């Protein structure tokens, strides 16, 4: 059973903090399942169209910037490390280090979005955006618009998740500074961490599928 | 969240514990949220039912009867969309499930009460958007929103698909909440195999909700983007494929059919055991068949697409896989029948509905096999045979199950007894009216009358007249039900703790239950259907 | 409170991070080499290794309750189902099928050399088949006066007389039976041998029809493919399909006075089907046909039928119309108007 300090965080319908923590975690894993299937739909579309138009994909992806994509991959991997470390220090009651690491994670997310912004800007400038004004002249294969539709929707949805993740990190960062968490209660940090790792996980697949086709 | 959990005085219940509109709007109590869901979904059932009556009235005679062709297209689209997304998907899990699940496992609440309330308001938000789309000209695509028409249609398709996206979130959160609750909050002694079968069904449903609903989310988003930006996924002109949309849509929407029927099957397991005064026959078989149905439901979506131009390989695969659904379903039906065998059957209103379920669902299920057969489906596809089939499953199955559950748990939920006499009258009227309405549609479909058409050939006129007449019988049955159920709230006799002699935990607490569900945490020592013991 | 709190995973985290960075470099590096179809396999193997590392260590699945692992793994299983069954349609449907182009080239014609010669058995068989398949239009005695003949203009072929437009040689009749001709439907649904039997029976109505040369038989036999017999529905669709609109071309437009009386008449009465300049090629729905079938009009320049160059015949045919060809009757013109219309059409045809 829970001790006095953790008791303050246990809702009336839970027996103890352990039960509450594992419930929250199971709930979050179930949520991550829905995330996987949400992105999954897009991956299905990607797989079908890539199998149908392999040459078009190979040609169209050359307009993406491998270097920027690679840097973003490294940025997200580093942020995942710092997030995992931050959870460790929150659990270790080391508030100062945890705050530093959470800030670093937040900055990584911001860096990712800035790089993404410049990539998008370049595509817009070249009319590689899926609406009426898509510029087919740069491609020998027709249907190149499909690749960019996939690119914008998949990376766009991922970017949205990065932004949401940054919001969550900012929230737990503030609460950590206020000393809301301890080794007895750190559920929000743990859950934010899991969410952030999933965002990284999706990018791990997006990077080779979009930037490294041939 | 825990501001009132142990403040309630002895003898009060969750209605009287706190009063005022605010106490309802911000409640975290699963019973209150369940009741709010019940009221909301029943309201939509009424709206959808009204549309059904109008559709049937229009089809009473060939040519124009009451509305124009365009209005008719909108009416049947809305009937489908409202009934499916606003009524039948949420009603049993979110209303009855919310109310009963924590009580039946001996918990004080669901695992995430705030998420539960959020899910309700998300649902209301989605429903509001759907209603807004009706005001703004309503969609005319049918509830399936098939491309390419849904991309081109000038009606408010984007709004209603977006409302489906929103309501999907509500469904996901409910399912997620239930899975965690069942895993983590069972009372001492309540093992998985001591859980009532209703909970196994809800558990299987929740799995589908979590796994399938995200896909309808991304599908509706893609459809909205396709309409606004022209991304081309579903547009052959841009290299896409309209049939891909059908894969996306049915990957959710076929399992969703089991989101609708599985909880009803759970109710039937409860009601038949209680009113036969017998231990349920084949407890584990029924429990596992629920999970098997949940799994197989993901493997069969292509049977909606036999005439869409999908590949022969795919059609053959899906045809064979669809047949598999019959196995766990038949296991259930056989076990329910075996439970009644030599039981002391008490023909109370819930049992009448349960028997109606058995009868109608068996017809619905078996005609499903006709449709699963590739060659037969090519003839029957998009005819009234399909309409009759899914109404036998959805209304003859799910709605009958819901009505059985509603009457069974009404005393527990409201603390009042309804009129048994009028209950029987309306049950018989609905059962007969249902068969008059939809049995005739099987024949119409066999004769080739296409579904969704505004007009029909003269040779179909007689049976359409019969079908419309049947719809009035159903309507009057529901009218009687509305009157006696609402009347029971003020004039009904006070319900005892256990009016039917049930053995599950909800009958161990008072009617209606107190805010924390139980005065003391129950310790479970025996299974839910131990009628032989005492 | 949770069991993993006692463990310090910091060192593991650093190792995982280093592996992820290395794997990222490897996957970028391999993308510069072409392994053909293995490209995607290599890239996905590396990505999956990275994802597994993240899930097991950063997300603690290795140390966590097994339920969480099962839950997460289930999402991948169901995603695989989604991909697999969708692919069973999308990728199987799009395998390019060899398109059969020729209308009659892939037709099974039986053993041409043998069947092209009449035999008493074939003729007897043909007689039975004729009664069920042909007599309703062509009449029991082949006079072109069957009960259904009344509806036709032009009338069904009278087998006892006249010049047979589609040819009277056995191979020619066989072709006509197979592909059909205007109101004459295709009988490709009948097995080749039965069609040959009909050929020989029909020829008994007027015994003086020309015989096949050896070359004719060889030519037909050469067309006989080993492929499956025609699907009659497909053949019908090919024959009645709306063909691509032909490019319009101008036949001496400048030299022709479209403002003349004939020109005016032509524009109002004829041009919708025959084109502004008689170029033809316009798809016209055959009157009363169901399902709709279409005929493309001929260019005037390419039509050498006798009535087109004889004023009297021209008026007669146009007054009666040719319903079998979708040509309606025009019966409200004065002789002077007919004359000017005829003159104008002759100008459009350009030759005569």
Image (cartoon, coloured by chain):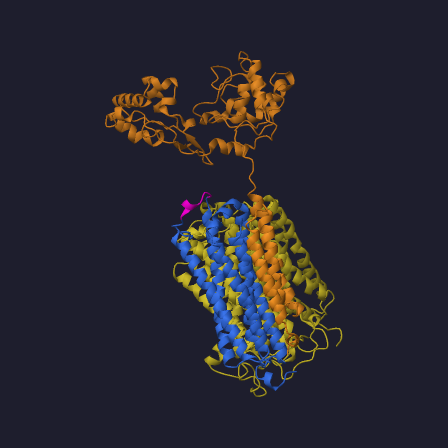
Chain colours: A blue, B yellow, C orange
Q: Is residue C216 left or right of residue B502?
A: left
C182 over A144 or under it: above or below? above
Location of residue B340 in the rendering, given as x and y in whole percent from the top left corner: 71, 65
Residue sitting at x 49%, y 65% = A162
Relative placement, left or right, of A190 versus C255 is right
**Which of B360/C194 is in front?**
C194
Q: Position of residue C107 (x, y in %)?
A: 57, 27
Residue found 49% across the figure and 83% down from its top: B19
Q: Position of residue A171 (x, y in %)?
A: 49, 74
State the residue lying farthest toward the right.
Answer: B533
Q: Nearer the viewer, residue C31 or C106?
A: C31
Seen at 59% across and 47% down, the residue is C35
For the C terminus of chain B, the image quarter is bottom right
> Can residue B395 be seen at all in this image of the molecule?
no
Q: Relative to A102, is C144 above or below?
A: above
Give residue C199's quadrant in the image: top right
Instruction: Kindly tell me whether residue C34 is visible in this rendering.
Output: yes
Is B70 situated above or below B39?
above
The furthest residue to the top: C208
Q: How many marks?
A: 0
Q: Position of residue A196 (x, y in %)?
A: 54, 67
Q: Is residue C250 magenta?
A: no
Span shown in magenta: A135-141
Displayed quadrant of residue C287: top left
Q: Nearer the viewer, residue A103 or B532?
A: A103
* Residue closest to the eye, C238 or C218: C218
């Amino acid at each position: 059973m829970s001790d006095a300090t953790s008791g303050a965080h246990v809702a009336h319908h839970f027996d103890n903090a352990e039960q509450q923590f594992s419930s929250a975690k199971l709930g979050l894993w179930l949520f991550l399942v829905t995330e996987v299937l949400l992105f999954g739909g897009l991956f299905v579309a990607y797989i079908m169209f890539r199998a149908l138009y392999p040459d078009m994909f190979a040609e169209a992806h050359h307009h993406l910037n491998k270097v920027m994509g690679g840097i973003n991959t490294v940025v997200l991997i580093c942020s995942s490390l710092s997030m995992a470390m931050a959870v460790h220090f929150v659990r270790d009651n080391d508030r100062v280090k945890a705050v530093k690491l959470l800030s670093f994670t937040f900055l990584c997310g911001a860096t990712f979005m800035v790089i993404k912004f410049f990539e998008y800007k370049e595509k817009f400038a070249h009319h590689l955006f899926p609406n009426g004004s898509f510029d087919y002249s740069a491609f020998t294969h027709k249907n190149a618009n499909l690749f960019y539709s996939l690119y914008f929707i998949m990376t766009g949805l991922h970017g949205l998740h990065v932004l949401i993740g940054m919001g969550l990190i900012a929230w737990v960062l503030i609460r950590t500074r206020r000393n809301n968490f301890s080794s007895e209660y750190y559920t929000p940090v743990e859950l934010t961490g899991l969410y952030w790792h999933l965002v990284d996980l999706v990018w791990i697949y997006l990077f080779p599928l979009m930037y490294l086709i041939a | 969240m825990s501001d009132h959990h142990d403040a309630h005085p002895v003898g009060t219940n969750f209605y009287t514990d706190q009063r005022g509109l605010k106490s309802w709007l911000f409640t975290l109590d699963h019973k209150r949220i369940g009741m709010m869901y019940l009221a909301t979904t029943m309201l939509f059932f009424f709206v959808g039912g009204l549309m059904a009556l109008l559709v049937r009235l229009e089809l009473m005679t060939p040519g124009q009867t009451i509305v124009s062709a365009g209005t008719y297209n909108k009416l049947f689209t809305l009937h489908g969309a409202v009934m499916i997304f606003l009524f039948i998907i949420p009603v049993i899990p979110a209303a009855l499930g919310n109310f009963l699940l924590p009580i039946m496992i001996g918990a004080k609440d669901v695992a995430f009460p705030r998420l539960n309330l959020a899910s309700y308001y998300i649902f209301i938000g989605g429903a509001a958007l759907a209603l807004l789309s009706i005001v703004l000209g309503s969609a005319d695509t049918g509830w399936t929103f098939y491309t390419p028409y849904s991309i081109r249609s000038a009606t408010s398709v984007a709004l209603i698909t977006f409302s489906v996206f929103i309501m999907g979130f509500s469904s996901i959160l409910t399912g997620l909440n239930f899975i965690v609750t069942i895993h983590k909050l069972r009372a001492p002694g309540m093992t998985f195999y001591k859980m009532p079968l209703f909970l196994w069904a809800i558990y299987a449903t929740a799995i589908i909700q979590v796994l399938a609903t995200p896909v309808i989310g991304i599908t509706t988003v893609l459809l909205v983007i396709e309409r606004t930006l022209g991304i081309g996924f579903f547009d052959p002109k841009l290299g896409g494929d309209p049939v891909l949309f059908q894969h996306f849509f049915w990957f959710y929407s076929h399992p969703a059919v089991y989101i609708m029927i599985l909880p009803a099957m759970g109710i039937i397991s409860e009601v038949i055991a209680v009113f036969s005064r017998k231990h349920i026959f084949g407890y584990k078989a029924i429990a596992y068949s629920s999970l098997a149905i949940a799994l197989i439901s993901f493997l069969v979506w292509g049977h909606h697409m036999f005439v869409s131009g999908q590949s022969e390989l795919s059609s053959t695969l899906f045809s064979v896989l669809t047949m598999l659904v019959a196995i766990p379903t038949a296991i259930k039906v056989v076990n329910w029948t075996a439970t009644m065998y030599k039981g002391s059957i008490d023909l109370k209103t819930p049992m009448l509905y349960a028997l109606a379920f058995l009868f109608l669902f068996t017809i619905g299920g078996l005609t499903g096999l006709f449709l699963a057969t590739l060659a037969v489906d090519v003839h029957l596809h998009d005819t009234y045979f399909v309409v009759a089939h899914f109404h036998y499953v959805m209304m003859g199955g799910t709605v009958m199950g819901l009505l059985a559950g509603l009457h069974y748990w009404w005393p527990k939920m409201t603390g009042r007894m309804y009129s048994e006499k009028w209950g029987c009258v309306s049950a018989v009227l609905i059962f007969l009216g249902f068969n008059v309405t939809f049995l005739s549609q099987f024949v119409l479909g066999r004769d080739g009358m296409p579904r969704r058409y505004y007009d029909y050939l003269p040779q179909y006129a007689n049976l359409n007249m019969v079908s419309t007449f049947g719809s009035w019988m159903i309507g009057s049955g529901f009218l009687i039900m509305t009157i006696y159920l609402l009347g029971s709230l003020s004039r009904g006799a006070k319900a005892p703790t256990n009016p039917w002699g049930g053995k599950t935990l909800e009958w161990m607490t008072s009617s209606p239950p107190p805010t924390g569900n139980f005065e003391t945490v129950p310790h479970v020592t025996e299974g839910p259907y131990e009628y032989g013991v005492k | 409170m949770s069991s993993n709190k006692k463990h310090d995973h910091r060192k593991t985290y650093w190792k995982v991070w280093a592996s992820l960075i290395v794997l990222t470099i490897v996957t970028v590096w391999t993308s510069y080499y072409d392994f053909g179809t293995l490209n995607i396999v290599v890239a996905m193997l590396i990505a999956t290794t990275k994802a597994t590392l993240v899930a097991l260590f950063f997300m603690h699945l290795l140390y966590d309750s097994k339920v969480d692992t099962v839950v997460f793994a289930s999402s991948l299983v169901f995603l695989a189902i989604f991909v697999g069954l969708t692919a069973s349609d999308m990728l199987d449907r799009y395998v390019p099928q060899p398109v059969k182009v020729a209308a009659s080239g892939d037709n099974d014609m039986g053993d041409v050399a043998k069947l092209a010669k009449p035999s008493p058995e074939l003729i007897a068989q043909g007689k039975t088949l004729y009664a069920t398949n042909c007599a309703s239009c062509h009449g029991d005695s082949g006079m072109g006066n069957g009960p259904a003949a009344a509806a036709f203009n032009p009338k069904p072929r009278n087998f006892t007389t006249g010049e047979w437009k589609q040819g009277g040689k056995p191979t020619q009749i066989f072709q006509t039976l197979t592909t059909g001709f205007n109101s004459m439907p295709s009988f490709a649904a009948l097995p080749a041998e039965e069609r040959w039997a009909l050929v020989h029976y029909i020829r008994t109505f007027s015994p003086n029809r020309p015989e096949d040369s050896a070359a004719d038989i060889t030519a037909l036999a050469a067309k006989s493919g080993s492929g499956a017999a025609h699907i009659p529905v497909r053949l019908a669709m090919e024959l009645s399909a709306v063909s691509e609109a032909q490019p319009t071309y101008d036949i001496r437009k400048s030299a022709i006075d479209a403002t003349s009386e004939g020109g005016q008449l032509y524009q109002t009465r004829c041009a919708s089907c025959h084109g502004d300049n008689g170029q033809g090629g316009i798809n016209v729905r055959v009157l009363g046909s169901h399902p709709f079938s279409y005929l493309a009009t001929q260019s005037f320049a390419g039509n050498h039928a006798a009535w087109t160059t004889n004023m009297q015949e021209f008026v007669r045919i146009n007054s009666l119309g040719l319903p079998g060809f979708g040509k309606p009757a025009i019966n409200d013109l004065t002789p002077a108007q007919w004359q000017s219309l005829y003159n104008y059409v002759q100008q459009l045809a350009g030759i005569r």
